[in-house]
Image (cartoon, rainbow, N blue to C red):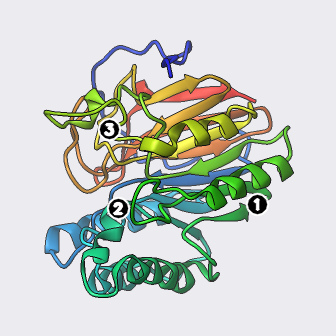
Amino acid sequence: MKKQLHPELTIPFCYFFKKNTDTAPLHQETPLLAFVAVADTHLREEGYRIRRFTRLFQSCKSMVQTDCLVICGDITDQGIRKNWEVVESLIPKTPMCILPCMGNHDTWEEESEGGFDKAVTHFTDFCTAVSGFEPNAVYYKRLVKGFPFIVLGRDNPQEPFFSDKQIAFLERELSLCDRKKPVFVVSHYALNQTHGLPETFGDEEYEDYTGGFEGCSDKINAVLQKYDNVILFSGHSHMGLNPTCTFEKVGNIHSLNLPCFMFGNHHGLYHCGLGYVVEVYEHSILFRPRSFLRGRWMHRYTIEIPY
């Protein structure tokens, strides 16, 4: 699949931290929805990781409006029960909706006794504890202030990692959504050969599918391309903010690859602690990258698209 870069993305490739304590929405009108999106928090029992994750929630709390927190996979570092317990203990009681997504690190429990099913149980138990709902699988749909979020997750231990049942779920749920409103599809993985993949994944050796949905990418893309109101969120690559690769128009959909929150990044702005504040207005969506650790906006990377 040939990559199509977003035509509005013409900012220079440089980073720009502007110290700014203003946490209000950028526009004067109140957003219909405002949420924070991060990826690759990689939590485990280490002091600096705990401090950074705690700072994320402090930053969310300081925002004038945060209706939802989306975590695009690799929530934990090893996928073991103790990792999940640490994450759960750090999430404060809040009216803010938490939407977790399962990443490859979150399945590493599959190597222990009990295998992949144990990893899935850890994830669904976590969703129940922090989100107030019990998903039947690692994929699910939630409405936040009337806007749909469709969360995908690896549900097979071997290729194909995304089952036909899950892809059918995606197609059914998209068909039920209002075509006049944006639909946010959340995944740890991007479509193959988007966002500079496979080169931007960072491996010295790679295949054409490295860093993406791999063998399921064409099927998933075929479903997504039926709609022009889809915004696909992903992580996984640990790619920093990059003016030609972070945000793309891929056929009919828009696609945003989030930098790694916990660690430094590559192929772009390298700082840890990065993510996005997304503000949905009546006729546009604003994507505002922010350093949640430093409390600064990266204004030069802000993008607004109509819908």
Name the foreground residue: 190 vs 156: 156
Q: Specify the quadrant of the image occupied by residue 284.
A: top right
- Choose the circle earlier in sequence order: 2 or 1: 2
Looking at the rendered structure, the secondary structure element under dot 1 is loop
Q: Position of residue 76 (x, y in %)?
A: 31, 70
Q: Is residue 134 left or right of residue 270?
A: right
- Can residue 268 be seen here? The reply is no
Gap between marks 2 and 3 measured at Cα: 17 Å
As drawn, the label of residue 210 is 3
Residue position marked by numbered label 1 in the rendering? 145
Q: Is residue 150 left or right of residue 244?
A: right
As drawn, the label of residue 223 is none
Q: Is residue 186 left or right of residue 214?
A: right
Gap between marks 1 and 3 measured at Cα: 35 Å
- Choose the circle earlier in sequence order: 1 or 3: 1
Name the foreground residue: 254 vs 21: 254
Q: Residue at x 32, y 38 (%)?
A: 210
Q: Position of residue 171 (x, y in %)?
A: 74, 49
Q: Quadrant of the C terminus?
A: top right
Q: Residue at x 53, y 62 (%)?
A: 69
Crowd around label 2: few <14 · some 14–19 · many ≥20 (10 Å): many
- Choose the circle earlier in sequence order: 2 or 3: 2
Gap between marks 2 and 1 measured at Cα: 26 Å
| Amino acid type, residue under disc 3 in the picture | Thr
Q: Is residue 43 left or right of residue 255?
A: left
Looking at the rendered structure, the secondary structure element under dot 2 is loop
Name the foreground residue: 170 vs 165: 165
| Amino acid type, residue under disc 1 in the picture | Lys
Residue position marked by numbered label 2 in the rendering? 74
